[in-house]
Image (cartoon, rainbow, N blue to C red):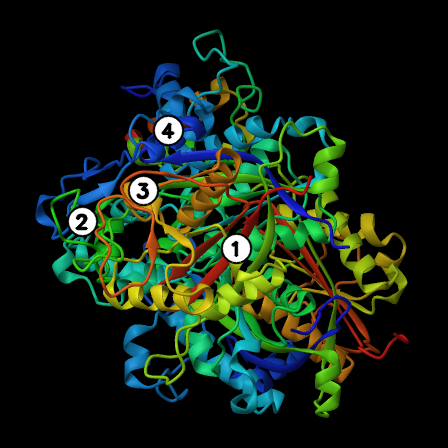
Amino acid sequence: MTPATVVTGLGVAAPNGLGLEPYWSAVLAGRGAIGRVSRFDPSSYPAQLAGEISGFVAEDHLPGRLLPQTDRMTRIALVGADWALEDAGVVPQTLPEYDMGVITASHSGGFEFGQRELQALWSKGGRYVSAYQSFAWFYAVNSGQISIRNGMRGPSGVVVSDQAGGLDAIAQARRQIRKGTPLIVSGAIDASICPWGWVAQLASDRISRSSDPRRAYLPFDDDAAGHVPGEGGALLILEDADYARARGARRIYAEIAGHAATFDPPPGSSRGPGLQRAVEQALADADAAPDEVDVVFADAAAVPELDRAEAEALTKVFGPRAVPVTAPKTMTGRLYSGAAPLDVATACLSIRDGVIPPTVHTALSAHYDLDLVSGSPRSAPVRTALVLARGYGGFNSAVVVRAPRP
Amino acid sequence: MPANPFTLDDLKSILREGAGADEGVDLDADILDSEFDALGYESLAMLETAGRIEREYGISLDEEAFADARTPRALLSLVNERLSSAQAV
Amino acid sequence: MSTGHGRQVVVTGIGVTAPGGTGTKGFWQLLTDGRTATRRISLFDPAAFRSQIAAEVDFDAEASGLSPQEIRRMDRAAQLAVVTAREAAADSGLAFHTLDPGRMGVTIGSAVGATTGLDEEYRTVSDGGRRELVDHEYAVPHLYNYMVPSSFAAEVAWAVGAEGPATVVSTGCTSGLDAVGYAAEVIRDGGADVMVAGATEAPISPITVACFDAIKATTPRNDDPEHASRPFDASRNGFVLGEGAAVFVLEDGESARRRGAHIYAEIAGYATRSNAFHMTGLRPDGKEMAEAIRVAMAEARINPEDIDYINAHGSGTKQNDRHETAAFKLSLGEAAHRTPVSSIKSMVGHSLGAVGSIELAASALAMEHHVVPPTANLHTPDPECDLDYTPLTAREHRTDTVLSVGSGFGGFQSAVVLARPDRRKR
């Protein structure tokens, strides 16, 4: 039998909670963190709301030598990886170096660092570009820096598939575990809330222009009009189940039981979007029937056409209102590749505590036949969760998270 | 010596700003003859440092001579030499 | 769904867009002639930079068959990827429209994504770096596609009609090997039957040149661009930036044979390891690259003496070429001294994330023609680089198994073994 890949540690950095338990209690209380952008003056832009992480002081966590060479997303990722390892009770220095790898997703790299260096280049000249620019902004930087900080010499990797990448990274980690590397740090942290990142985001035409934090990001609502960008995500410790047990892991949150990724047909095709296929294939990969799924963590794009596609896919696979659906990301904004790993972490906690966290602010549109968990959390035994993520351009990814086998 | 010599304090502030400081190292101790490596600055940090010195002082440092300047004392002397000859021109 | 484990993954189509020649044919001609495509940069005025040399692709998007809409919305790297993917698709002889699109995926490697497009657009929205609060009114509609390079995979998926797993792999300068390794694993895993996989890069822009200037990684040999890339030579002093793309059609071996496809090679082994040492530095012992090589050989079930040709990373920096030489000796032992090695970066430059795929294409073509491409500009070997680097001229040589390696910022060390698919009874 293929060895099971299990989640043994969670490192969470979300706008509404820095660290696992602060995040979880915020989510259960329905406490969001969407507000006016504070990292720069957003007055001149048509969108001004974001889910920002406040209170993260890199100096409190990281060596001084790392700070000049790291973008904000890398600093948060390094700390997130530390927290995940700590949560898993893993001391990397005590494990064989090739037994550990790092596979993360990235969305836009260190965009804020990149803006600073582009500004130096064009305002002052090439000699003003930092020696660290050659890697501090690029997509591979978080995997590289996490592997260096923790002495992890096993297979590492980086995938970019917009928001779907967060799940693709977890799937690639599972592949490496199956191939024989017993422990992989996986997931993603993104943070590109800077003027240059903001302008690039705005070009996607998917950003909400509302100025009311309670009305800005409303997936599956008749008033859905785009999303609010956020920063953060989650890093997870994934292990071969036998390895985790043998090292006496203090807990196994869940198993990564299934995955599938698909790509939408080109615009104008008669075939429907690929999300439904991703769901069906991920369930088949997990050997799970639709009625075994206790909760779906939706992609929740809050773009009417995309909401419709997601609702239709869920209704077709599960039946009308047949499975609880939720989008705690309504509290944080969309975290790009960080979003789905955070949802996987949240699914682990749902399984642990038997509670489904709510979607906030949304009033479910009558057009969607969904059982949307909204307003307050719902107590329910959760054994199997489905996490969905879609990326700009047509990327779909689905992961099945299941309670650990006894 | 040039009129406004490049001092150890100048070097330390450039190091701190450009490459940060290793918590295990006291830059305010007597470091003139410590190797940069021992102070926690590897070659990449030194490249950043070189770039900053060149920009701030408007000089250009010979790449090999810079690589050979392994201690603050050697680097100060190299930079001051360049500053003197730049002023002499 | 078909079960994937134990499936053989083979290369049935190759597309290359590299400096110095048109298409796969032009590329191979350049390599076997031992000519170099490194020149003074023409894509922008490089006068203000330390290193002013690059290997540029002579690329005309329109003549390459891209529509005006495609040209408008795509960064140069995406354009290179799409054109090259189309060449690979045609070369494979595979009737793509008859395939189940859901069983076909795309993996594209790139280290720096749409950095050239981002550099240009930043200049506009910032008014030449004067505005910190950059102006969205001046942003092009496709700026988000530049920001997130998964757009490369999307464009290629549309171009070939793939609706299975699609992604970009971005592991710095090993991206081109890792993207192919990733795709092979997807096929073996049963996630797809056909993968269009490869890598692209168009990094020749002021910001990229400036960032390598800052760490003196690129050569300043501006007075002699044609001989500026000198892997393994004692006089080497940095790499020459390049650009380009190479894309492959990878298939399940059994179905490729069933349709009578021409099979270039099997992706017989792949591994990547991290040095966990430094974002840009390498340890002289080459230990992690050696480990990647050993694991890739084990997966391919071959021994060091089975390797007929080593396609080196050979970037031409002081530290890389020694690191790599040490890694070959560590992983291959005595066989390292008997196996021809070469670095085509001497001719086509270092196209960062793309070059791993371009080098895999050269490796597959070496098997196709039983010719080992040379290392150009290698006149006086570094005494610490004491292997057979195939200096100056291509060599006829029976080539059934090739090892291709890469090394990159972030500490990534990757190795791919290409072999004849029928070399052993299965």
Nearer to us: label 4 or label 3: 4
Q: Is residue C75 above or below residue C67?
A: above
User: For this rendering, which residue is in front, C150 or A308?
Assistant: A308
- Residue type at mark 4 is Ser
Name the quadrant of the C terminus of chain B: top left
First-in-chain label (1 vs 4): 4
Q: Which residue position holds label 2?
A: A216
Query: Is residue C347 visible to us here?
Result: yes
Q: Tags 3 and 1 in contact by the CB under 8 Å rule?
A: no
Label 4: chain? Answer: A
For residue C249, side relative to residue C224 (left or right):
right
Q: Quadrant of residue C233?
A: bottom right
Q: Which residue is mark 4?
A: A25
Q: Quadrant of residue A224?
A: bottom left
For image coordinates 85% across by 58% down, the residue present is C337
SS label for mark 3: helix
Picture coordinates of residue A73 (x, y %)?
Answer: 39, 40
Q: Are marks 2 and 4 on the same chain?
A: yes
* Residue labelled with disc 1: A399
Q: Check whether the beta carbons of the residues at disc 3 and disc 2 lie within 8 A of each other.
A: no
Q: Chain of mark 3?
A: A
The residue tagged 3 is A128
Q: Nearer the viewer, residue A120 or C364?
A: C364
Mark 2 chain: A
Q: Nearer the viewer, mark 2 or mark 4?
A: 4
Q: Is residue C265 left or right of residue C202?
A: right
Whether tag 2 and tag 4 are in contact, CB under 8 A, the answer is no
Counting residues from the N terminus, which is met first, the one under dot 3 or under dot 1? Answer: 3
Chain letter of disc 1 in the image = A
Mark 1 vs 2, N-terminal side: 2
